[in-house]
């Protein structure tokens, strides 16, 4: 597969797609309920105009462009426009507070930043005195933008005006600048900087070269069975490597289609309208879809509920069995279940046309994977890091061992190092951390990327045990993997987060956050009164519900790993409170400190 793909950079591939497939639809953008198509020719034209506009604003070759926005066509136009003139794109999480944004923008030496709207622009303006290198702020949505009505030393400009200036430059022969930049561009050049979530400290800027991107794409295409007819709904943050992988890396090499919905809040509706052939969801997305189906079936009539239970029981044994091995009887059983029940549920979540569905970025309860595969959704678990430029292991969509992340993809060499740590080597291993030689040297040693993840290899498939730094040792000297315990508990539709406490303790306890939506609907059905999150948590019957779910989870665990006591959190874990990262990863140290008194109360006799 790798020999089939040209040895070209992403911007060079955009120009090539525009040359060879000018009228084919590359992107669809939904605005006010209407899907607007953009061809490869238009994609390249608008990106090149934006790139020339960036040059006119003073962004040099090798300069750094920041983008802080939800997913939309302007995101990739800015990214590819920067690439077409030899600049580097740095994504910034739009959910981040102003102080975190200021740190990333300053540390990354961003000279021009693209902001989605007033909210994001205000965060940058608030931090201007800490951003000496910032030259310009480009705003996508300018309707009602107060900042354009006041003097900001000419720093704020409209996205459309930058495109317009680039179009004027192109009419005066500016395209020669892009041709020259692309002629000089090599796979060794840095194309992206992606900042880590910062779950254990300040975020680090991972430098991703075009060689890294070119190195990861063949393995992704082969393992997931993708081609130019693939369609994808882009909604996870584009400043994360997982979404970059499916919104820019693969589509630009394959010529496949990307769809940008109205917003992150309309994902369910957009999924039903797009019905993509591939879909990526972090575990929380799959847990919510699972909870949604669970609630829907609880509210169903007796006949519907019976048909659902019968269909799921009939197809349960097929979840991990390759379709090529199904007997005639099993095919008939699935077909009957599909036409009577499963097809409607696949339509309900918008995944009836999905040829492959992915979960990654964090561990997922195995029962959730089994549930969707029983439903007929070809869900596979994949594994990768920012530092590996994305997915480096994954299942073939028709050959799954639930609980593992599959074998390494093409081009990724691996071995297991000290303490069971996974080490990876290949073109996809990143260039290093920006302005942090010490962290780079600790991450890449003797040419091997040290992932920090403990694994076991089982018949060629890798099983992620836990983060090396998260392994806990009880007071009795037993080694525990908290993620195994936490994911077992999160298999319940009523539990959103479970944070295990066990290091140096006599037994395992946990801090549990309920799923407010799911538990709330359950409480309404039970006629239990509540007005807000805390009032719901404080209901004795909710405590009994979660206690039963913990007991159900404990039945799947070894005795030493079972949760003996738990504390229900009185609020949702919050990014602004430093409890989770922008990607919703738990910051254990911060949570342990914030709930120290509650934790100690669990261990009182």
Image (cartoon, rainbow, N blue to C red):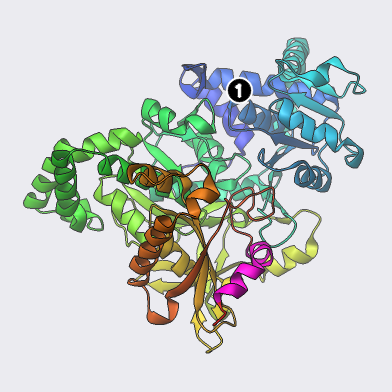
Establish if 381 lies above or below 230. Answer: below
- Residue found farthest to the bottom: 476
- Counting from the top left corner in percent of width and height, residue 439 is at 74, 64
Establish if 255 lies above or below 470. Answer: above
Location of mark 1 (residue) = 44
Along the line of sight, the residue nearer the viewer: 33 or 303: 303
Along the line of sight, the residue nearer the viewer: 126 or 222: 126
- Counting from the top left corner in percent of width and height, residue 24 is at 45, 20
On the picture, is 494 further left or further right than 156? left
On-image quarter of the C terminus: bottom right
In percent of the image, x 22 and y 36: which residue is there? 343
- Counting from the top left corner in percent of width and height, residue 321 is at 22, 57
- Counting from the top left corner in percent of width and height, residue 180 is at 74, 28
Q: Quadrant of residue 127?
A: top right
Establish if 488 lies above or below 167. Answer: below
SS type, badge 1: helix
């Amino acid at each position: 597969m790798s020999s089939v793909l040209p040895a070209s950079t992403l911007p060079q591939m955009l120009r090539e797609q525009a040359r060879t497939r000018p009228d084919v639809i590359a992107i669809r953008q939904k605005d006010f309920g209407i899907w607007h198509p953009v061809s490869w020719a238009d994609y390249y034209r608008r990106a090149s105009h934006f790139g020339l506009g960036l040059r006119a604003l003073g962004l040099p070759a090798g300069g750094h462009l920041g983008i802080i926005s939800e997913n939309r066509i302007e995101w990739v136009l800015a990214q590819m426009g920067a690439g077409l003139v030899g600049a580097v794109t740095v994504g910034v999480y739009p959910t981040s507070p102003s102080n975190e944004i200021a740190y990333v923008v300053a540390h990354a030496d961003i000279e021009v930043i693209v902001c989605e709207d007033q909210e994001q622009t205000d965060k940058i303006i608030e931090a201007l005195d800490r951003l000496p290198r910032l030259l310009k702020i480009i705003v996508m949505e300018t309707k009602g933008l107060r900042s354009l009505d006041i003097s900001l030393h000419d720093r704020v400009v409209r996205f459309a005006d930058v495109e317009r200036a680039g179009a004027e430059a192109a009419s005066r022969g500016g395209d020669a600048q892009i041709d020259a930049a692309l002629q000089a561009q090599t796979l060794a050049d840095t194309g992206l900087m992606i900042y880590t979530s910062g779950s254990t400290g300040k975020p680090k800027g991972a430098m991703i070269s075009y060689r890294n991107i070119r190195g990861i794409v063949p393995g992704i295409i082969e393992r997931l069975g993708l081609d130019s007819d693939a369609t994808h709904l882009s909604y996870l943050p584009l400043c994360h490597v997982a979404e970059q992988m499916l919104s820019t890396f693969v589509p630009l090499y394959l010529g496949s289609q990307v769809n940008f919905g109205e917003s992150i809040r309309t994902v369910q509706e957009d999924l039903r309208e797009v019905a993509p052939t591939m879909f990526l969801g972090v575990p929380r997305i799959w847990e919510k879809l699972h909870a949604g189906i669970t609630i829907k079936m609880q509210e169903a009539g007796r006949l519907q509920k019976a048909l659902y239970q019968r269909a799921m029981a009939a197809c349960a044994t097929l979840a991990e069995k390759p379709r090529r091995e199904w007997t005639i009887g099993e095919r008939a059983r699935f077909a009957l279940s599909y036409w009577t029940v499963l097809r409607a549920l696949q339509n309900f979540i918008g995944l009836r046309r999905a040829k492959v569905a992915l979960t990654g970025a964090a561990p997922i309860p195995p029962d959730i994977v089994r549930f969707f595969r029983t439903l007929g959704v070809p869900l596979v678990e994949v594994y990768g890091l920012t530092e590996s430029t994305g997915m480096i292991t994954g299942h073939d969509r028709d050959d799954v061992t639930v609980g593992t992340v599959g074998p390494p993809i093409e081009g990724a060499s691996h071995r297991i190092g000290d303490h069971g740590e996974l080490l990876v080597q290949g073109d996809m291993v990143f260039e290093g951390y920006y302005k942090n030689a010490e962290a780079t040297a600790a991450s890449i040693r003797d040419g091997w990327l040290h992932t920090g993840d403990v694994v076991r290899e089982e018949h060629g498939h890798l099983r992620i045990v836990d983060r090396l730094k998260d392994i806990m040792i009880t007071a009795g000297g037993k080694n525990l993997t908290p993620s195994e315990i936490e994911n077992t508990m999160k298999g319940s539709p009523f539990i959103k987060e479970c944070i295990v406490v066990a290091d140096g303790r006599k037994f395992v306890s946990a801090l549990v956050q309920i799923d407010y939506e799911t538990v709330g609907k359950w409480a309404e059905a039970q006629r239990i009164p509540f007005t807000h999150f805390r009032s719901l948590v404080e209901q004795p019957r909710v405590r009994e519900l979660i206690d039963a779910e913990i007991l159900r989870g404990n039945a799947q665990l070894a005795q030493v790993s079972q949760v003996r006591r738990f504390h229900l959190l009185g609020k949702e874990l919050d990014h602004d409170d430093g409890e989770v990262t922008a990607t919703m990863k738990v910051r254990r140290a911060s949570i342990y400190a914030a709930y120290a008194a509650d934790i100690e109360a669990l261990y009182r006799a």
